[in-house]
Image: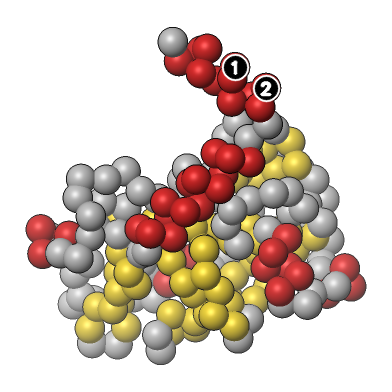
Amino acid sequence: MSVGWLPVDNSTPEPKRPKVYPHLVLGFSEEDKIGTIQPHDDALVITLRIGGYDVKRVIVDGGSGAEIMYPDLYKGLKLRPEDLTSYSSPLLTFDRKMVMPKGQIRLPVQTGPEIVEANFIVVDIYSPYTATVARPWLHTLGAVASTLHQKVKFPSKVRVLEIRGCQVMARECLVVAISHWPEAESSAHVEESS
């Protein structure tokens, strides 16, 4: 289950310039499916090094316009309110709920030899994920993600590197998310589906 995030206002953060690697082609083939459970409809859930720590349960959501940090990561990094900069625009989830962020923090995200800075908007709502990385991170890294192939590919100097997703972790997060839904919402959803 992917939860997408969009900033409510139309302002854009400072421009990030993508890296240019003229001779590298980012693509996926049938060979990229080797090692995955097929067929599937799993989210792309990866482990990233954020703020100097290996962080599991990071969902890659190319449909979202903002990087999001959830309470587990906020607490795990031992962040305090004074570590955050102001972010006063509400966020709109894809299920049309408004969320007021606690603030924003810029942290390094390391993928192999590449380190890019990402602005994480901190929200205090439940999620089975620790963070969401979205279009800004993908574009800054020059990456392409494929849920089908369970990979993120990105250029690094003279070769293409990849981050593999973890389907087991993605499925565990889905089960946790479904079990966390309030009883009223899940029964209403079942009735609407009938």
- Residues at marks 1 and 2 touching, judged by CB atoms closer than 8 Å: yes
Name which residue lies at 50% across and 45% down. Answer: 175
Q: Position of residue 21 (x, y in %)?
A: 28, 78
Q: Position of residue 124 (x, y in %)?
A: 77, 53
Mark linked to residue 184: 2
- Please say if 103 is above or below 96: below
Please tell me whether residue 97 is drawn above or below residue 25 in the rendered image.
above
Provide the residue designation for mark 1: 188
Give the residue drawn at x 57%, y 35%.
94
Taking the spot 41% from the left edge, 89% from the top edge, the residue there is: 113
Q: Residues within 10 Å of mark 1 (few under 14, many from 20)?
A: few
Furthest-right residue in this view: 82
Q: Between residue 1 and residue 156, name the one nearer to us.
A: 1
Q: With 30 as the anchor, is 147 left or right in this view?
A: right
Q: Quadrant of residue 36?
A: bottom left
Is residue 75 shown left or right of residue 107? right
> Within 10 angstroms of label 2, few (less than 14), some, or many (20 or more) residues?
few
Q: Could you say whether the residue bearing mark 2 is in a helix, strand or loop? A: helix
For residue 192, say whether it is visible: yes
Per the image, label 1 sits on a secondary structure element best described as helix
* Residue at the image position 20 percent from the left and 45 percent from the top: 39
Residue 154, above or below 90:
below
